[in-house]
Image (cartoon, grey):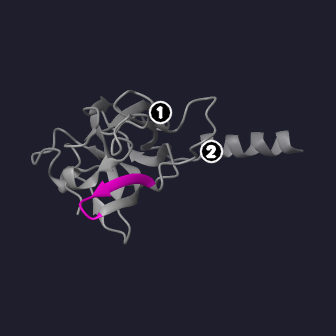
Amino acid sequence: MRGALAIAVASLLVAAPGCSVDTGVVEWAWAFVDRDGDPIFPSGVFDLGRTSSCALPGRTDSGQVRYDLGAELVICDPECAGGCEDPDCQVVAPLGFDCDRSRGSNPSVPSSDAPYQFTISPVVTLPGGNECRDLDACIAAPGPRERVVHPGLVTDLQVFQLVVGMDQGGPDSGSGSLDLQGCGCE
């Protein structure tokens, strides 16, 4: 019975006049590593210790704090007159993901004939909810990628690697934590 129902639904979709798919799916993943390239999150295949990038060790002049490290993807039209720095040139609203995620997707990205620009950025959330986004001084993110989004298909952006300015296994007392003040986070 299921097979007959699936055939009937598929036939209806093909035969329905005026139906068009004008969006595609965009998928991506990200990985946080320390300065030595050691994984922070997601951790290595055989390392079961860390299950998120939540409550990571950080420091300020006031002492040690814990912060959450997430990621945000911005999709823009580079042919837009304002350029990718202009929020009006964004194809969809920025897609932010919390510290317990390392993959994301959006099933409703408008299809395009020309490539969109995809930029991933780290987001630090401090205790109390304050967020830091301009983190170039302490977290290196890759440059933008350009891809065409085809209607009805999946566009896989692959894995973005972000390098966090700390060394988890370093001999210095502060090297296993991120200098949040040096990042510009207050």
Tell me the residue that label 1 is attached to. Answer: 39
Q: Is residue 158 above or below residue 129?
A: above
143 or 172: nearer the viewer = 172
Tag of residue 13:
2
Magenta span main SS: strand
Give, as a three-letter code, the residue at label 1: Pro
Residue 60 covered by magenta stretch: yes
**Quarter of image, res 129:** bottom left
In the image, residue 146 lies at what x, y percent?
29, 30
In the image, residue 15 lies at what x, y percent?
61, 42
In the image, residue 76 lies at what x, y percent?
25, 44
Disc number lying in front (1 or 2) = 1
Residue visible at 43% across and 34% down in the picture? 169
Q: What's the magenta region?
A: 56-62
Give, as a three-letter code, the residue at label 2: Leu
Q: Is residue 183 above or below residue 77?
A: below
**Quarter of image, res 147:** top left
Given the current orientation, which residue lies at the most extreme left position? Answer: 81
